[in-house]
Amino acid sequence: MELYSIPSKKLDGYIGTNLHPSEEFQENVRDAVDRICSFLKEDCDLDQDANVIKTIKAGSAGKGTTLDMSSDVDLVIFLSCFSSFKDQAKRRERVIKDIEKNLKRCIQTIAFRVEIFPPRRKGTPPRALSVLIQAKKKTESVEVDILPAYDALGPISFTYVPPKEVYIELIEANGDPGEFNTSFTELHRNFVKRCPSKLKDLLRLVKHWYKEIKKQSNSMSPKLPAKLPPKFALELLTIYAWEEEKKGAEQFNTAEGFCTVMKLITQYQDLCFYWTKYYTLEDSQIGVHVKGKLKESRPVIIDPVDPTANVAKANVEAWDLLAQKASDCLTQSCCMKNEEPINPWNVQPARDIEVTVKQQTGAPKVISCNPFVPIKWIKKQIGKEGRICELYLEETALQNDKRLADYGIFYNTTFRLLRITSQKMNIFVKDLNNRTTNYTVNSSETVLGLKKIIEASKHIASRREQERAREQTGTGIREEYTKSSFSVATVAIQ
């Protein structure tokens, strides 16, 4: 891969020279989109109730992260014939077939060459019509995906946030994860367009690396590229890394950012994050849905505009392959400085959260922590380490050696701290002479406390006392201790 031979200090120049789209290519894209929009509005004879409300250029062309000669142009057409998400699912296939029929009918008269591709997802109803468009005066062709969509949002501004009812309707539509994300195209576009130019260049670099990996895999086996995780997951991973480390800063070291993304890919089994820019977990219905998604097998990256979609969903082999490639990339010149690996940003696979602990007495305590800390660490922060008490999430007692992540807790949450009620219990201890002694203790007793009870019962001096005796009499600790030793290798609890 050419990228691997580029010194890290020259990555910015490499992006500008090799990855930025040329003006000619951008003009071809604009021309293709304009022509297909004109056709849909003026020459496409759809049903009377299927009027085009608006068309939105999506994909990298709409977000401003286009690679030269490699642009995924998505053209979303919002139609009046769709009255809901469910209605879109019901009528979408027929609309796509009508558009295809109209294109074939007009193919000889329109002022550009059109090639229609078969559906990409075999065995399922098509969600898009893929066409290759070439203006008759141009040499380059542009591939465009035409996606009919339900206008769930209406007119929006750059700062628009949908009402919660839109997301409740989306969840209740019970479609496949991400099935209706075209309705949120403008939010997708705005989410990425607000990124500074430097971050968009980093997005280009990550996408270029991904496409080269896909190309290499294709040369080895035609089946491998389809198994790679979705490219959009890597785009969101890149934005997440920048947000966590740079907090919105427009300037940063490109090589450090690139190495951070590569490192996070190798940690894919721990990736779990989401955004609350457009929807909130505070709403009970939306919150329950997203929290359920966060408990799925990692990696989990929830679409920032569509809470039904985990965009990182892929089989383990796919992520294993990508992680191997990312690990290899970290050893190349583009990720080295003075023959030493570049230090990535300190970005964790999941965001820190706030944990509120309600106690039986006193004010609640709030702790900021990462979801991968163990429960016993939280108890230590509130001064309850080693105490006979449990943290409860609703009716579930959390085990000390488990992590918050093991319970799918990647969001601000509240625990109850309850002291365990002490009960009497019998413990039978067998000594080295095979004699068994019964000790009655509280269930809240510690092992150390039990040991002291046994020592007192058997008149066994503690090690400190034996050490003092040794200093006075010269008797060895091991010798004195062995004379009256006991075994707890066999313990029966009743």
Image (spheres, grey):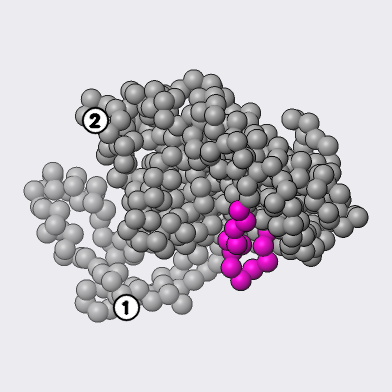
Which three-letter amino acid code belongs to the residue tagged 2?
A: Glu
Q: Residue at x 24, y 49 (%)?
A: 465
Q: Residue at x 76, y 41 (%)?
A: 38
Q: Please give the count of numbered marks on the rendered protein.
A: 2
| Residue found farthest to the top | 251
Is any part of residue 279 visible from this angle? Answer: no
Is residue 96 inside the magenta stretch? no
Which three-letter amino acid code belongs to the residue tagged 1?
A: Thr
Instruction: Please identify the quadrant where the N terminus is shown.
Output: top left
Report the Cα–Cα distance between label 2 and label 1. Answer: 63 Å
State the residue position of label 1: 436
Magenta span main SS = loop
> Where in the figure is residue 412, as x and y percent of width and height?
63, 44
| Residue found farthest to the front | 108
Count neighbours of disc 1 (C-alpha within 10 A) and say few if under 14, some if 14 to 19, many if 20 or more. Answer: some
Relative to residue 96, is residue 293 drawn left or right?
A: left
Numbered circle sitting on residue 340: 2
Relative to residue 385, is residue 164 drawn left or right?
A: right
